[in-house]
Image: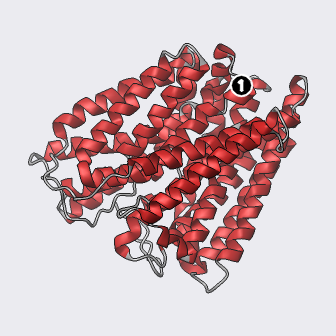
Amino acid sequence: MSVDLAMPETELTKSEIAIETPAKSTDIAKTSVSEDAAAPRAPRSRWIALAVVSAVNALDAAGFAIANTALPDIDHSLGMGASLLPWVMTVYALTFAGFLLFGGRAADVLGRRRMLLGGVGLYAAGAAVAAFAPTGTVLIGGRALQGIGAALSGPPALALIASIFTDTRERAKAMGIYVAISASSFAGALVVGGVLTSAAGWRAPFFALLVLSASVTLVGAKVLPQDTERTRGSLDLPGAALITAGLIALVYGVSQAEHASFASAQVLAPVAVAAVLLAGFVVREHLAAEPLLPLGLMRVRTVRAATVSGVVFYTTMVGLLFFAPLYLQGVRGYSPLMSGLAVAPMGLTVAASTSVAARMVTRLGHRFTLVTGFTIMAAGLATWLLIGDDTNYFTVLLPGIVVMSFGQTLAFAAMMSAALTGVESERHGVAGAVNITAQQIGSGLGTAVLASVAAVASGAGSAGLIDGYRAGIATAAAIGLFGALAGGVLLRRGRDA
């Protein structure tokens, strides 16, 4: 079932406004391009192919969510500490962000089937490294491979559905199934991660990802249609490497602030390296005949606003996603399963409020909906400033989760609509990809910033931990308010500008 939201200047589908994870947002391939593959003839094989493509999207979401509830167990087992533990989440987001635009280009040039299967295979390899990791450093390396694999496998998804289901009604039904799986994957992964970690330890979720991704690769090789047409063009691998290395250097520099002052060489040296690498990326994209990131897009005001909002959006979300399991398991004694269940209402709230967000964007415009969404997100996070040794879940924590989740639904709907407004239809794919990249940057950078703030503010004992968590959450809420202010300023012209 596809949903036409009748946006004033662009059309959004339900899959574009439902909020799940850095991974769900990888559905950026253009579906209006000429079909590059012959669909399987047997009706049954078409639906099996849909299951494969949907599973890829679920894997990308699970790559972020399923490890979330395992963080305390990982820290206890590998002794990663406050400085290294955030990289379990951060490196996945940053490699995802750095190679996402490259993944979209590679799918067009090398073939969508090839890139989807190759990406899932790389994802499986990363899951295997993570599952068997003897040290935190090896685990982080495996997570980096998973992030690159997700970036390569995600972009071809929607285009493959369009080429497999040529009948309009069947395609609409297929998209409905795909969206339903996407909508449940993030919340489901939180719960599944908790179940597996509680039953068999932190390695179990990564073994599950390994088995699922390997199965998807094997089945996909049999049922996905062969690539018959490809776009001629070049691949900008150096550009992808520059932006990824630059982002990692930037986040590493920020993370060192918990050990030294921001003016120290420990912080400034990697930040300077990051500045050089990111400047090199901009220069390369300016000179490249076929850049990964058309810099002209940044001249569009709505695209600039959506890009800033993308970074702020996920930085604010991390305020809950990162600290909730640490607080619930480390301070309150929740099991990984109970911790996952405690945060699961986030996904349920998003699913329930998606249609409300769509109507608000249509009737009230991007600016009002974005500002309102970020403000509500900050208010929901502020509720978690009340955390203590015995804070009641149902009267304090759950309302905060629900309120923040409703706000993120509004902000995401407005942000994704703004990202495509004022952009030619043939550039919607890359415009969406730019925004998704910004979201992943926010996820990685936000984790590093908030973890550093929490580490600096933490003291001894559970009271000291709670002080650190409160500081990180307060910072995330403040960043959410900054997003409301920035959105109001950048989108100040016109109702739908």
* Quadrant housing the N terminus: bottom left
Q: Residue at x 82, y 48 (%)?
A: 474
Residue type for callout 1: Tyr
Q: Residue 391 or 25: which is nearer the viewer?
A: 25
Foreground: 428 or 234?
Answer: 234
Which quadrant of the figure contains the C terminus? bottom right
The residue at which mark 1 appears reads as 334
Dot 1 alpha-carbon crowd within 10 angstroms: few under 14, some 14 to 19, many 20 or more: some
Residue 78 seen anywhere in this rendered image of the structure: yes
Secondary structure under the numbered disc 1 in the rendered image: loop
Depicted 376 relative to depicted 205: above or below: below
Who's the residue at 29% across and 51% down the image? Answer: 107
- Would residue 346 be found to the left or right of residue 22 on screen? right
Residue 219: percent from left, percent from top = 23, 32
Q: How many marks?
A: 1
**How does the figure colour the protein chain or chains?**
secondary structure
Above or below for 417 versus 400: below
Quarter of the view holding residue 334: top right
Percent from the top left, x then y, of residue 90?
60, 38
